[in-house]
Image (cartoon, rainbow, N blue to C red):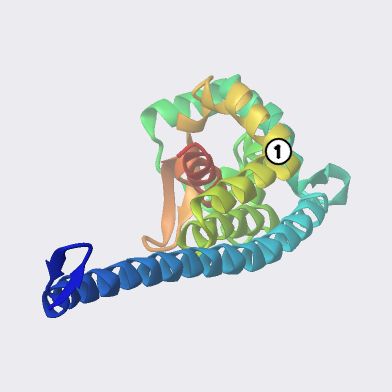
Amino acid sequence: MIEINGYLLNIELISMIITPLISLIAVIIYAKALKNSTEQNKIILSQNIKANFEKEIHNLFNEGNEKSGLENENDAFKILNIFEGIFPLIRNLTNDEEFESDRVKKTILNEEKLILKRYNKNLFKIRSVVYENSKSAEYYKNLEIFLNNIESSQMIKEDKYFIKNQLRRNVLKETLEYYKSHLKTTHLTEMLIPLYEQKYNEIKWIKLNKSHLFNSIEKIIDNLEK
């Protein structure tokens, strides 16, 4: 006990109260500093990852401007403009009476029968780009994977949005606008066409949006609009 200004103070009691309080304050300060440090590390990591994604966007832009033939080099379109290339062909099919009759009836076909069809030229050009091994279908599949990688990356939310927005604005803007206005809103993506199904080893009438090319662009749109 000590006396200060006429008051008796219990030093041991004061120590028992103040020491834990100081320790608690120290823990709070440390925890806050640790949290700030962790957040800062996340931001630094995110920035490094973002830089790699930005480089890949540049590569995807260059690849998208390469040409992909519908059947031969004379029919070549930039991959980013491939939907503009096949839109008239799809329209031609819808205006073909023989095709419409086969489509409505879901006529059983094989390659030999298709070759004899009046609409075979338009159909074969469309099929040359919607299958998974076509240059165009592979490109849009890579875009789909690219977007999935963004979502699963360790980037912070703001950087994920930035990269997706860069892809939308700098690579896909015109492609998506054309696809939505000419194919999706007109419901042409729902149109059935005869496609070879590997798992069935036969030709089946399948909606365009279920083909590899169209399926990828639909998933890309869904991802960008999240």
The structure residue drawn at horizontal position 61% and vertical position 41%, both measured from the top left corner, is 116
Residue 140 showing in the rendered view: yes
Residue 154 % position (x, y): 50, 65
Residue sitting nearer the eye, 89 or 29 = 29
In the depicted structure, whether residue 154 falls above or below residue 63? below
The structure residue drawn at horizontal position 52% and vertical position 66%, both measured from the top left corner, is 42
Would residue 175 be found to the left or right of residue 12 on screen? right
The structure residue drawn at horizontal position 56% and vertical position 46%, both measured from the top left corner, is 161
In the depicted structure, whether residue 191 falls above or below residue 3? above
Please name the residue that numbered disc 1 is placed on.
169
In the depicted structure, whether residue 87 falls above or below residue 109? above
Which quarter of the image is occupied by the C terminus? top left
Which residue is farthest front?
Answer: 6
Would residue 21 be found to the left or right of residue 32 on screen? left
Residue sitting nearer the eye, 203 or 220 = 220
Would residue 10 be found to the left or right of residue 223 on screen? left
Secondary structure under badge 1?
A: helix
Which quarter of the image is occupied by the N terminus? bottom left
Which residue is farthest right?
Answer: 74
The structure residue drawn at horizontal position 72% and vertical position 32%, both measured from the top left corner, is 174
Residue 157 % position (x, y): 50, 51
Residue 47 % position (x, y): 64, 62
Q: Residues within 10 Å of mark 1 (few under 14, many from 20)?
A: few
Quarter of the figure with residue 179: top right
